[in-house]
Image: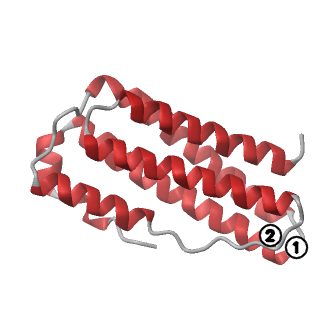
Amino acid sequence: MDIYEFAMQMEKDGENYYRDLAQKVDNKGLKNILSFLADAEVKHHDILKKMKDNEKTQLSETKILSDVKNVFEKMKEENDTSGADTSQIELYKDALEIEKKNHEFFLEKAEEVEDQAQKEILLKLADEEESHCTILENIINFVSQPDSWLEDAEWYHLEGN
């Protein structure tokens, strides 16, 4: 399996994981955030497919962090901590570990490719995976302590890319 096939499968698996997890979540805000993550994985898959097919492509700036921040702000305004299920923390931790591995994978592959445009895209993908880690860390903190977490508003470090 070549680098692109492997990476595309990795992104497809990520999309499926987030969509499955969103189905298990009762909190509307978390559902939205997980859908954002799944959609980002689809975008990554499509970029990698174009790279594999030697099509000219670029990775546009994402606003996932600002979108997630907006969801958390709305949850705070509505004091919506319903459906924050601590039994799902391990699922979020698993997703976090996967995103960390994906981040490292894209950094490594960026070092291996000769084409500068592809290198830049792989580095941007690594940055996006790192953003996903930040999102998942915030979800884990929220699910662990929903009332105090929203009240403390520690997630204000989420800024749009």
As drawn, is 21 to the left or to the right of 61?
Answer: left
SS label for mark 1: loop
Residue 68, above or below 89 = below
Given residues 50 and 140, the one toward you in this image is 50
The reply to whether dot 2 and dot 1 touch (C-beta < 8 Å) is yes
Determine which residue is flagged by label 2: 118
For the residue carrying disc 1, how many other residues have a C-alpha within 10 Å: few (<14), some (14-19), or many (20+)? few
Instruction: Give the CA distance from mark 2 to mark 1.
Output: 5 Å
Question: Going 27% across and 27% down the picture, which residue do you hit?
Answer: 86
Q: Which residue is tagged 1?
A: 115
Answer left or right for 119 relative to 66.
right
Residue drawn at point x = 79 percent, y = 43 percent: 6
Snapshot quadrant of residue 155: bottom left
Kind of element beneath mark 2: helix
Q: Position of residue 48 (x, y in %)?
A: 76, 57
Q: Is residue 53 left or right of residue 22?
A: right
Task: Look at the image and tell me in which quarter the N terminus lies.
Answer: top right
Image location of residue 118, percent across then percent down:
80, 70
Q: Amino acid at mark 1?
A: Asp
Determine which quarter of the picture holds residue 139.
top left
Vertical arrangement, residue 16 with respect to residue 113, above or below: above
Position of 5 relative to 110 (above/below):
above
Q: Mark 2 is on which residue type? A: Gln
Q: Nearer the viewer, residue 34 or 131?
A: 34
The image's mark for residue 99 is: none
**Residue drawn at 27 percent across, 47 percent down:** 29
Please, is residue 30 above or below residue 109 in the view? above
Structural crowding at the residue carrying mark 2, measured as other residues with C-alpha within 10 Å and reported as few (<14), some (14–19) or many (≥20)? some
Instruction: Kindly give the residue lying farthest to the top in the view shown.
Output: 87
Q: Residue 3: image x %, image y %?
A: 84, 49
Query: Which residue corresponds to the image point at 56% horizontal and 46% vertical from the top-left?
Result: 99
Residue 157 x/y as whole percent: 31, 66
